[in-house]
């Protein structure tokens, strides 16, 4: 039985260079040695290679061999005898992603202290990105995800970092539906303010928008109030506004990467389909849902038609898209910044507040407070290196 077999835990450390791992295993090849586990990491040129071996009757020879091989390679060696394989991980697997620029030791200490206080074990840590932010992914076992998420939200606020807590294992993999808000999320602008500028009423409309996004006004009421200010504008202003819209930094990378992974991407907006639909088509987004402006005789009437896309309708749209794609709600991600996004952030499997108002950050599963939308990829365990490698391959294929 593997639980009682004699084993050797061999740990080699030192300067990394090509051929170290192959040399070690070539040295082991003549012996009837079973490889139970291997972990290898390199941090700034420093190698750590750990081998869990079942050497059979050759334990003494293998131990001497590993020490001699390490010496030949200029590495330090530790060989610890024992019995059996690794202990099985406890249930309650989770991934904690910590993101900041810069990421300081005090923040990592606070996160790991909270993990330890929950009785969870850190099984693995890896860096997902270095620029423009530093992101660490911490794999845990023995975690109560909802309770840990609540406590780490307090840590995030106190330390000024962004933290996401999500179930680990298979829940971390597979196809997803990602639904994004548009204004101040996918794009940097508020479309209704761009439209209002053509009517000379931008400041007035901006004040109402800000109050609505803070949750101080009913969204539908504020929408009707703001759209009324657009009455009489010629339909041609819509094209001017489409040309003026600025994507949020990282938006193209975010959508492109999600599509490469086979994800379904959707946008839902309290703005207007006349702007949102062409933008979605340009980016290759699968679904778009937004308010529709009423136009009569080539001019805006100051009214919208159809169902108002408020916070309840955004959540309903997310559910509809998930049903259409055959995905459970646990496989959905919502990204938004305002009070109008709260319902969809709540019902999604993971709700991400992107540079959001305080009321939204307090209720979301995860926060991102840097101006790069593609950092949301890191919250899902996708590394910067993986994104850049995919870009290079696409460029080479093109």
Image (cartoon, rainbow, N blue to C red):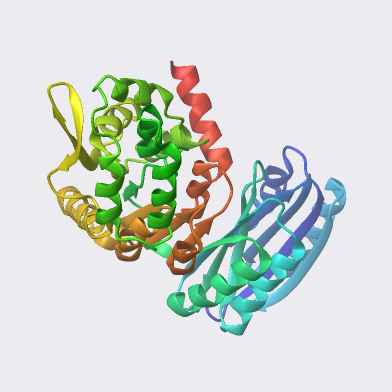
Vertically, is 155 above or below 388?
below
Vertically, is 291 above or below 316?
above
Q: Closest to the observer: 71 or 321?
A: 321
Q: Locate residue 101, reporting x and y percent.
A: 68, 50
Q: Is residue 173 visible?
A: no
Q: Locate residue 342, reporting x and y percent.
A: 35, 62
Q: Is residue 306 left or right of residue 211?
A: left
Q: Closest to the observer: 201 or 78?
A: 201
Q: Closest to the observer: 202 or 146?
A: 202
Q: Locate residue 13, reporting x and y percent.
A: 79, 56
Q: Closest to the observer: 311 or 262?
A: 311
Residue in the image at 44% along x and 57% along y? 352
Residue in the image at 26% along x and 31% along y? 277
Q: Locate residue 313, reporting x and y percent.
A: 21, 55
Q: Is residue 388 left or right of residue 329?
A: right
User: Within the image, what quadrant is residue 264 found in?
Assistant: top left
Vertically, is 96 above or below 145?
above
Residue in the image at 40% along x and 55% along y? 213
Q: Report the quarter where the C terminus lies.
A: top left
User: Within the image, what quadrant is residue 162 found in?
Assistant: bottom right
């Amino acid at each position: 039985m593997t639980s009682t077999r004699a084993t050797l835990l061999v740990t080699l450390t030192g300067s990394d260079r090509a051929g170290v791992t192959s040399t070690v295993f070539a040295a082991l090849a003549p012996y009837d040695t079973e490889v139970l586990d291997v972990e290898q990491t390199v941090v700034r040129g420093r190698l750590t290679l750990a081998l869990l071996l079942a050497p059979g009757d050759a334990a003494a020879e293998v131990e001497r061999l590993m020490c001699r091989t390490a010496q030949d390679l200029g590495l330090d060696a530790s060989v610890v005898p024992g019995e059996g394989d690794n202990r099985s991980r406890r249930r309650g697997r989770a991934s904690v992603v910590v993101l900041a620029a810069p990421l300081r030791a005090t923040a990592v200490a606070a996160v790991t202290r909270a993990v330890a206080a929950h009785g969870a074990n850190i099984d693995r840590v890896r860096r997902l990105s270095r620029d423009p932010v530093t992101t660490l992914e911490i794999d845990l076992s023995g975690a109560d995800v909802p309770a840990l998420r609540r406590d780490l939200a307090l840590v995030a606020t106190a330390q000024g970092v962004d933290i996401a807590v999500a179930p680990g294992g298979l829940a971390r993999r597979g196809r997803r539906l990602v639904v994004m808000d548009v204004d101040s999320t996918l794009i940097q602008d508020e479309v209704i303010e761009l439209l209002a500028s053509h009517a000379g009423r931008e400041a007035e409309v901006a004040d109402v928008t800000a109050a609505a996004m803070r949750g101080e006004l009913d969204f539908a009421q504020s929408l009707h109030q703001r759209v009324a200010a657009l009455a009489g504008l010629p339909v041609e202003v819509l094209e001017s506004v489409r040309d003026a819209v600025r994507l949020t930094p990282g938006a193209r990378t975010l959508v492109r990467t999600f599509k490469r992974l086979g994800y379904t991407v959707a946008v839902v907006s309290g703005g207007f389909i006349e702007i949102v639909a062409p933008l979605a088509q340009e980016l290759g987004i699968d679904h778009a849902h937004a308010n529709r402006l009423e136009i009569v005789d080539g001019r805006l009437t100051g009214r919208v038609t159809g169902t108002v896309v408020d916070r309840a309708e955004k959540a309903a749209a997310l559910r509809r898209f998930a049903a259409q794609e055959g995905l459970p709600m646990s496989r959905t991600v919502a990204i938004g910044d305002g009070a109008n996004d709260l319902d969809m952030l709540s019902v999604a499997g993971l709700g991400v507040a992107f540079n959001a108002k305080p009321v939204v950050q307090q209720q979301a599963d995860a926060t991102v407070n840097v101006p790069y939308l593609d950092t949301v990829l890191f919250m899902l365990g996708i590394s910067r290196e993986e994104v850049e490698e995919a870009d290079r391959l696409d460029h080479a294929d093109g």
